[in-house]
Image (cartoon, rainbow, N blue to C red):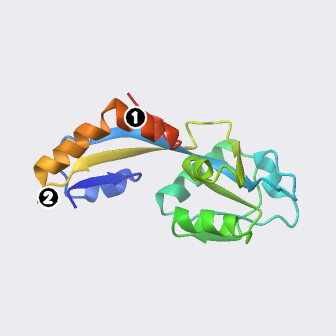
Amino acid sequence: MDVFVSASSKDMQTASVRTPIYEGFVFNRMVLAVPVKNPFKIVRIKDLNKPGLKWIQCAHEVPCGSAADAALESDGTVTSKPVSLEPKASGVIAKLMQGEVDAAIVYHTDVVRNRKALKEIVFRDRLASSTRYAIAIIADGKQKPLARAFMDFVESPKASLYLRRSGFGVIS
């Protein structure tokens, strides 16, 4: 591995990376995702409190979980608890797509990838629900010229366009 990307500033700090770290080159935000066919008629974040509704999010200690926690805390309207705390964002979206739950707090990019099956409800406080990704070259990487070329690509207009189309926000 020659380039490291993380949504966790803690992970980035403990990784063996060369400086400078390109802080916040893109961001993603947490949203409430529901199936297009939405039997609970979820239209607001506080609808997570509806009796019988099952919802999930990532575990508190992983980046998607801490971002979900921050979004929920900022919103202040949800008193119900998730039926599961998943260790990975991919597990959250998989359970929602399989119909195991009625709603999930996921990354906006997950909804973009599944836009025919899902719709999203955004949190009012976009800052609280956002996650910034940092990127850096690994200090003991074996392919430093290739890593530098990749970093140059990440900063290019072509990469910016691709990232935006994928649902990321790009920080100039």
**Left or right, 102 with reference to 39:** left
- 104 versus 145 height, above or below: below
Question: Where residue 16 appears, x then y in whole percent?
Answer: 19, 58
Q: Who is closer to the viewer here, 162 or 68?
A: 162
Q: Residue at x 23, y 37 (%)?
A: 152
Q: Quadrant of the N terminus?
A: bottom left
**Left or right, 7 with reference to 126:** left
Amino acid carrying label 1: it is Ser
Q: Which mark is residue 141?
A: 2
Q: Earlier in the sequence, mark 2 or mark 1?
A: 2
Amino acid carrying label 2: it is Gly
Question: Where residue 137 appears, x then y in whole percent?
Answer: 20, 50
Q: Residue at x 33, y 52 (%)?
A: 5
Residue denoted by label 1: 160
**Left or right, 172 with reference to 13:** right
Q: Residue at x 68, y 36 (%)?
A: 124
Is residue 150 visible from the viewing direction of this image?
A: yes
Is residue 59 visible from the viewing direction of this image?
A: no
Q: Secondary structure at mark 2?
A: loop
